[in-house]
Image (cartoon, rainbow, N blue to C red):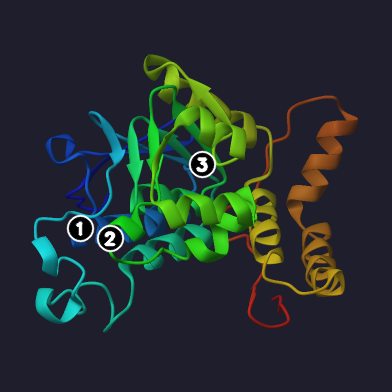
Amino acid sequence: MADFHTLDLEIDNGLAVATFNRPDQMNTFNPAMIADLLALFDLTDADDAVRAVVITGSGRAFCAGADLGGGGDTFDYDKRGRADDIGGADRDGGGMVTLRIFRSLKPVIAASNGAAVGIGATMQLAMDWRMAAEDSRYGFVFSRRGVTPEACSGWFLPRLVGMPKALDWTYSGRVFGAAEALDAGLVQSLHPAADLLDAAKEKALEMTASSAPVSVALARQLMWQGQTMAHPMDMHRVDSRVFAARGRSADVREGVTAFREKREATYPDTVPEGLPDMDWAAEPRFK
């Protein structure tokens, strides 16, 4: 188990529940959180016991944005010396986290328990399902801090809520309530705060408990990577090869047999060992 500093991790019943653990700082984002989140998804990808990942916060916030303890120099990498901490000069650490979530082999669910502002909102955009407490609040506040949207949100946010709403939120930088987030499609469901985490776990199990883990991992990549493709034929080339690879698998033999025998399937293939050799940036290659 990795040694995390900014989150607590519990793995049980096929679910990895990661809880940001700095409630006194409203779980604000810092280099340690970047490292922890990158390590978290490396761990969950490699652990066969994990079917899905739930991310939530402690206290009054999911994540209230960047740690502004550096004052006016917080976002000046030259003065703050953050470049070495986050993987290269001028590279956005939030974007590194979002891209790692984008590549996750397991479904990821956000259980937003309170304030989700700045990176606290944008890191959720690459997650597969976003749930929120009824009193939670969101804000893409970058223009009110003199910076710009980050964490690849210029790619994700318009795809999720449409361009007009994305522009409204990012131009104004206003903080808005969970009901507006739900209406716009930023979140999929609202829950009383006391019920949120249980509801997130229930949704994660609903998504994964009866499905072949390798098929879920591949479906996740097909859906997300498909957003980068210019033409349906590009997807056809990819999903034809993915489908053919799965068709030869032990999972398919078990899944079809279990269906015919009217019993629950027990899928033998595991993630990541059972995945075909994928190269999403080019034509896929399979072993």
Of all residues, the one furthest to the front in this rendering is 172
Residue that mark 1 sits on: 30
- Residue 270's place in the image compared with 237, above or below, is above
Q: Amino acid at mark 2?
A: Ile
In this rendering, does residue 25 appear at all? yes
- Residue 107 point in image, percent of width and height: 55, 46
CB-based contact (under 8 Å), mark 1 and mark 2: yes
For label 2, the residue is: 34
* Residue type at the position of mark 1: Asn
Q: Are marks 1 and 3 in contact (CB under 8 Å)?
A: no
Q: Is residue 2 above or below residue 16?
A: below
Work out whether mark 3 precedes mark 2 in sequence or the reverse, and give the earlier one: 2
Q: Quadrant of the C terminus?
A: bottom right
Q: Which mark is residue 196?
A: none
Q: Position of residue 212 (x, y in %)?
A: 68, 44
Indicate which label's residue lies in the foreground, 3 or 2.
2
Q: Which element carries disc 3, helix, strand or loop?
A: strand
Secondary structure under badge 1?
Answer: loop
- Mark 1–mark 2 Cα distance, whole angstroms, equals 7 Å
